[in-house]
Image: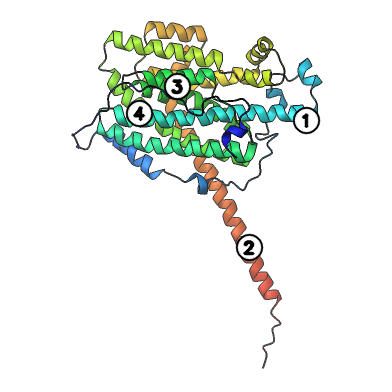
């Protein structure tokens, strides 16, 4: 079975070609480079993991309730549409929403892999090339595990959202070497982290919680990398050059806030498009997601030096300007800690199970001993 057979909609051409622009840059300077970036590169090497082994793929997943979220998270909950749905239709709606969410994660991770490879090619500094190479591997692993989760556990895939594809295409088509950093590491990764974190903290299902927590542990390094590289570079740019990048951020933020809603899932269930958009906009789940989305992006944008008057006005309009003072370092530290705690809990459970097996084997052996040696 090919992935095409699992798509909820025909994805069209099986490939997407984005014309490459810009230059491939080599560096003949093999000195040690920046200490902070090389330390992150070392961490990137040390923290590599195998999605086949670290994830417990034997854990069961109910495809009709893969995340175990309350039904009131559904935009149609407590509406006439929800009241008319049969139990089977409600099951399918949960499945489709999870498929849409994880499909966007999957497509975004492939985009991140391509962007990381583009950074390896185009960034002028060797230390940044080194780290980007480890990130390329990280993103390949993430695409691998999201693809497996969708194919084996949910059995349904959605095509890439048009607006996510548009933002990804704009990021890749720009010839300036810093734009894959800005578009991917700051905007798209910020979007992903908000969605990952929201689902990681809400689900009580072990398998998706593992996947989301371990991916977020990697992403904490990726965001740190983008912040370091862009902060250093943007200090050198003119006011006009910074304004161009701020315009890109403004457009990207409005796009993510206003367009990435998943209302296609509702139209698949026969709800007219205008009503699907309205129901999605009124969703409490979407409101919380947007708040978390900007909690990741706004402090990062401010940290790298894009904080001009027009950008600040846009964030005032979005109601998120105050998030510029949030501690991104604290959020990233929490992401690391959650993954490590999950590992510790899993290892403790496995160790307890092994001790129980040994104790049972000893007890069985002792019970089979008659106590009288044969002569």
Sequence-wise, which precedes: disc 4 or disc 3? 4
Q: Residue at x 69, y 83 (%)?
A: 371
What's the CA distance linking mark 1 and mark 4? 45 Å
Kindly indicate the quadrant of the structure image that contains residue 350: bottom right
Q: Which circle, 3 or 2, is nearer the viewer?
A: 3
Q: Nearer the viewer, residue 261 or 69?
A: 261
Q: Nearer the viewer, residue 164 or 208?
A: 164
Please tell me how crowded label 4 is: few (under 14), some (14-19), or many (20+) other residues with Cα within 10 Å: many
Q: Which residue is mark 4?
A: 118
Horizontally, is 332 left or right of 10 in the view?
left
Q: In this figure, which colouring scheme has been used for the structure?
A: rainbow
- For the residue labelled by badge 2, is the local secondary structure a helix, a strand or a loop? helix
- For the residue labelled by badge 1, is the local secondary structure a helix, a strand or a loop? helix
Kindly indicate the quadrant of the structure image that contains residue 76: top right
Please tell me how crowded label 3 is: few (under 14), some (14-19), or many (20+) other residues with Cα within 10 Å: many
What's the CA distance linking mark 2 and mark 1? 41 Å
Residue 34: in sight, yes or no? Answer: no
Sequence-wise, which precedes: disc 2 or disc 4? 4
Q: Which residue is mark 1?
A: 88
Say if 45 sits above or below 238 in the image. below
What's the CA distance linking mark 4 and mark 3? 13 Å
> Where's residue 299, x and y in %?
43, 20
Q: Which residue is mark 2?
A: 357
- For the residue labelled by badge 4, is the local secondary structure a helix, a strand or a loop? helix
- State if disc 2 and disc 3 touch (CB < 8 Å): no
Q: Residue at x 56, y 52 (%)?
A: 348
Q: Which circle, 2 or 4, is nearer the viewer?
A: 4
Please tell me how crowded label 1 is: few (under 14), some (14-19), or many (20+) other residues with Cα within 10 Å: few
> Where's residue 137, x and y in %?
41, 39
What's the CA distance linking mark 3 and mark 2? 51 Å
What's the CA distance linking mark 1 and mark 3? 36 Å
> Where's residue 266, x and y in %?
68, 19
């Amino acid at each position: 079975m090919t992935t095409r057979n699992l798509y909820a909609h025909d994805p069209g051409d099986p490939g997407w070609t984005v014309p490459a622009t810009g230059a491939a840059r080599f560096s003949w300077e093999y000195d040690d480079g920046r200490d902070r970036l090389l330390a992150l590169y070392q961490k990137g090497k040390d923290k590599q993991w195998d999605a086949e082994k670290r994830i417990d793929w034997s854990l069961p997943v109910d495809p009709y309730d893969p995340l175990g979220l309350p039904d009131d998270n559904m935009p149609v909950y407590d509406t006439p549409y929800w009241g008319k749905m049969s139990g089977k239709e409600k099951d399918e709606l949960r499945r489709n929403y999870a498929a849409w969410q994880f499909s966007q994660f999957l497509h975004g991770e492939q985009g991140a892999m391509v962007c990381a490879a583009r950074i390896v090619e185009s960034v002028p500094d060797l230390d940044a090339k080194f780290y980007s190479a480890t990130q390329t591997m990280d993103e390949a692993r993430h695409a691998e595990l999201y693809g497996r989760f969708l194919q084996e556990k949910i059995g349904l895939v959605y095509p890439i959202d048009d607006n996510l594809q548009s933002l990804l295409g704009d990021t890749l088509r720009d010839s300036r070497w810093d734009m894959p950093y800005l578009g991917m590491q700051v905007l798209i990764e910020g979007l992903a982290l908000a969605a990952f974190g929201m689902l990681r903290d809400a689900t009580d299902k072990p398998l998706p919680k593992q996947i989301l927590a371990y991916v977020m542990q990697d992403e904490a390094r990726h965001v740190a990398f983008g912040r370091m590289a862009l902060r250093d570079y943007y200090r050198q740019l003119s006011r006009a050059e910074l304004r161009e990048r701020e315009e890109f951020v403004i457009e990207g933020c409005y796009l993510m806030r206003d367009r990435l809603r998943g209302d296609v899932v509702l139209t698949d269930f026969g709800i007219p498009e205008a009503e699907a958009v309205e129901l999605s906009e009124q969703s409490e789940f979407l409101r919380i997601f947007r708040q978390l989305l900007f909690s990741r992006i706004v402090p990062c944008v401010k940290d790298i030096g894009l904080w001009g008057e027009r950008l600040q006005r846009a964030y005032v309009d979005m109601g998120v300007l105050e998030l510029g003072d949030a501690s991104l370092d604290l959020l990233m530290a929490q992401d690391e800690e959650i993954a490590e705690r999950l590992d510790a809990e899993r290892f403790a459970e496995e160790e307890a199970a092994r001790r129980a097996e040994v104790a049972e084997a000893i007890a069985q052996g002792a019970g089979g001993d008659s106590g009288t040696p044969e002569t």
